[in-house]
Amino acid sequence: MTTATPAKPNVPLPVASRLAERVIDELRSSCERIEVAGSIRRHKPIVHDIDLVAIPKLGDGLFPGDANAPTRLDEAVGELVRGGRLQRVRGGPKATTLKIPAVPGLHIELWTCNANTWGWIHCLRTGPAEFTRALVTNRRQGGHCPSHLRFFQGRVYREGNRTPIAVPSEQALFDLLEMPCLPPEGRA
C-alpha cells in the first residue's frame, strides 16, 4: 500500500508575504541579516512554502566562534517552538524546516549562511531550481558558469584553488559569472 504525498498548499502571495514578514520580525533581533527568498521574492502569485535566508548572530557560548555552539537564531527559533508559534519539522546545521500551526501544510525553509556566502545562498534559495542549476553548470555544457569557477557546498571557488571566494551580494555573484544581475522576478 502506498501513501499519497500531501498536496502542497496554494497560498496567495500577499498572505504568504505577510506570514513571512511576521516570522522575520520574530527572528530579526537574532540575526545579522534575514530576508525572504524563494517564490515570494520572485513575486509568484501562488506560494507553496516560505524560504528565508539568515546570517545568525553568534550565541553566548563558552567558546566564542565555536561552530557547534547554538546561535542566537537557534535560541530564538527554539523559543518560538516552545511557545507553540512554530513547529519544527526537521533541522540541521544549514537548514531548518518549520511550520506555522495555524496554516496547515505551509512550511518555512530557514537557510543559514555567513556574510561571505550570502550572495550565493540568497540567489540559490531564491531560485527557481532550473535557473540556479544553469548558474552552476559550465558554459561548455550550456550553463552560465565560466570554466575557471566551481560551486561546492555553498561556496564558490576558482579552479585549482581551495580558498573560497567571498560572495557577499548577488551583484558579486553575477560579476563572478560575468553576466548581468537579473532581478528575482526575471529568473526563469
Image: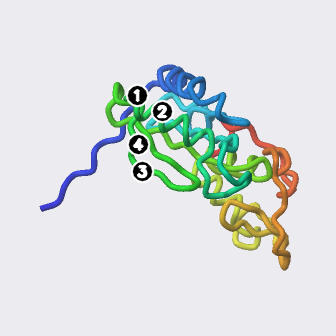
Q: Nearer the viewer, residue 182 or 6?
A: 6
Q: CA distance from mark 4 to mark 2?
A: 11 Å
Q: Amino acid at mark 2?
A: Glu
User: CB of mark 3 within 8 Å of CB of mark 1?
Assistant: no
User: CB of mark 3 within 8 Å of CB of mark 4?
Assistant: yes
Q: Amino acid at mark 3?
A: Arg
Q: Nearer the viewer, residue 52 or 74?
A: 74
Q: Amino acid at mark 1?
A: Gly
Tag 1 or tag 3, which sits nearer the N-term? 1
Q: Quadrant of residue 152?
A: bottom right
Q: Amino acid at mark 4?
A: Arg
Secondary structure under tag 2 reads helix
Q: CA distance from mark 3 to mark 1?
A: 17 Å
Q: CA distance from mark 4 to mark 1?
A: 12 Å
Secondary structure under tag 4 reads strand
Tag 1 or tag 4, which sits nearer the N-term? 1
Which residue is at 55% across, 39% downward?
75
Q: Is residue 25 above or below residue 147?
A: above
Q: Nearer the viewer, residue 111 or 28?
A: 28
Which residue is at 75% across, 53% downward?
117
Q: Which residue is mark 1?
A: 83
Q: Which residue is mark 4?
A: 88
Q: Quadrant of residue 84?
A: top left
Give neighbour class at mark 3: few <14, some 14-19, many 20+ (Cα, 10 Å): few
Disc on res. 90: 3
Q: Quadrant of residue 33?
A: top right
Q: Which residue is mark 2?
A: 79
